[in-house]
Image (cartoon, grey):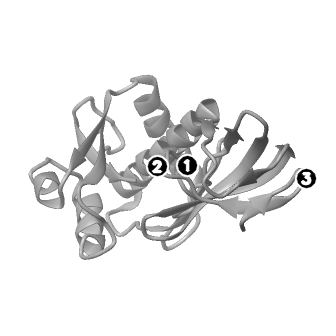
Amino acid sequence: MISFQKAKKGKLSLTPHLSTQSLGGQVGDTGIIKTNSSSLHVFDTIKPIAGLFVHKVKVTRGSVKVSDTVDAVIDIERRRSIMGHHTATHLLQKALRDILGQHVAQAGSLVTPEYFRFDFTHFHALKRDELVMAEEIVNKAIRRNYDVSIESKSIEEARKIRRHSFIWRKILKHSQGSYSEPQRTVLYRVLRRHTRKPHRRHRLFQDHI
């Protein structure tokens, strides 16, 4: 669109971008875009093609047009909640693979500020004791508040990092074209393989988002 007027909805892209898009089950960023004479509510952010971040907006004051200089503010507390739930999906996946077996694989997810849903493959529904054990493992990892580091690495550099084997296979599968260089790499410490008697050893766990 060339311009937006008050109360109108539309889509726009900013240069440079600073938001996280809706992708892979994770909801996109929200926030506010402002100029001296206008204000827009950002209610979603998407990535329709590689390298293009699009904000879905509603104009709440004034109007904006192409080439306007704007200030963009992300709802950072909302983003932090999403980040925490994103990490929790990986903690849960590792716990389920340790409890149920290495055949468990992610089959979908939904990550929001309020909650996350994790879909996975298994032969039957979780038994009560398996559910309780998975909750205990994930909650214990959360309480330990493991350090998280965010680094920019090439795929080759990431290969040198000690990693969880299942996640590494997933990275290799998608690295043939889906990931650009350099890649944003998130590393965090999690409990090592658990049995019926969890122990305290831990290892690095790798995630690309």
Please tell me whether mark 3 sits on a helix, a strand or a loop: loop
Q: Nearer the viewer, mark 3 or mark 1?
A: 3
Q: Amino acid at mark 2?
A: Pro
In this image, 130 relative to 12: left or right? left
The reply to whether dot 3 and dot 1 touch (C-beta < 8 Å) is: no
Residue 80: image location, x then y, percent: 55, 34
Considering only order in the chain, which callout, 2 or 3, is on the residue closer to the N terminus? 3
Alpha carbon separation for disc pair 2 and 1: 44 Å
Q: Which residue is mark 1?
A: 131
Identify the image quadrant of residue 127.
bottom right
Q: Is residue 161 above or below residue 34?
A: below
Assess disc 3: are there few (<14), some (14-19) or many (≥20) residues with their C-alpha within 10 Å of its C-alpha: few
Q: Residue at x 42, y 50 (%)?
A: 90
Q: Which residue is mark 3?
A: 7
The one nearer the camera, 22 or 134, is 22
Considering only order in the chain, which callout, 1 or 2, is on the residue closer to the N terminus? 2
Tag of residue 43: none
Q: Is residue 119 above or below residue 27?
A: below
Q: Amino acid at mark 1?
A: Leu
Alpha carbon separation for disc pair 3 and 2: 25 Å
Q: Amino acid at mark 3?
A: Ala
Q: Which residue is mark 2?
A: 16
Please tell me whether mark 1 sits on a helix, a strand or a loop: helix
Residue 16: image location, x then y, percent: 46, 49
Asked whether residue 114 appears in the rendered view, the answer is: no
